[in-house]
Image (tube, rainbow, N blue to C red):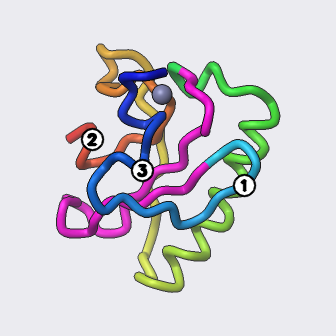
Amino acid sequence: MDNCLLCQPFDLDDQQIVLENKTCLYIQSPQHQLILEGSELIIPKAHRPSVFDLTQEEWNDTYSLLADAKKYVHRRLKPDGFNIGWNCGEVSGQHIPHAHPCHPSFCG
Ligand SMILES: [Zn+2]
């Protein structure tokens, strides 16, 4: 989708792709832009309006990246816990219509 911020994650300044598999990306915004250190996103490479629109393969790849992301964040920050969630629909706080977990710099 041409005007979707998350369909072109490379267009965001200093956005880094940390991990990747066949259908999904694990991306990290510049840490100085974050309200909560360690907040990152797992997004499908294809445009999917919400998490309910993921294919089975994308769900599997999301799960796989989530497990890898947990190890990555734990190694870096050793957090006591994690918050994981998706806002689905504008009234629920989803401001970018491309499936992504709630992210303080996007949803805050
Ligand atoms: Zn998109």
Query: Which amino acid does the dot numbered 1 rest on?
Result: Asn
Mark 3 to mark 1 CA distance (whole Å): 16 Å
> Which image quadrant is residue 45 in?
top right
**Going from the N terminus, do you reach mark 2 or mark 3 first?**
3
Q: Per the image, is 37 magenta?
A: yes
Q: Relative to 82, is 24 above or below?
A: above
Residue that badge 3 annotates:
10
Mark 2 or mark 3: which is in front? 3
Q: Relative to 41, is 58 above or below?
A: above
Q: Relative to 15, is 59 above or below?
A: above
Q: Secondary structure at mark 3?
A: helix
Q: How many marks?
A: 3
Residue lying at 60% horizontally and 64% vertically, measured from the top left: 19
Q: Position of residue 18 (x, y in %)?
A: 53, 66
Query: Which amino acid does the dot numbered 2 rest on?
Result: Phe
Mark 1 to mark 2 CA distance (whole Å): 23 Å
Residue that badge 2 annotates:
106
Q: Position of residue 2 (x, y in %)?
A: 43, 22
Residue that badge 1 annotates:
21
Residue lying at 53% horizontally and 85% vertically, measured from the top left: 75
Identify the magenta region: 25-48
**Going from the N terminus, do you reach mark 3 or mark 1 first?**
3
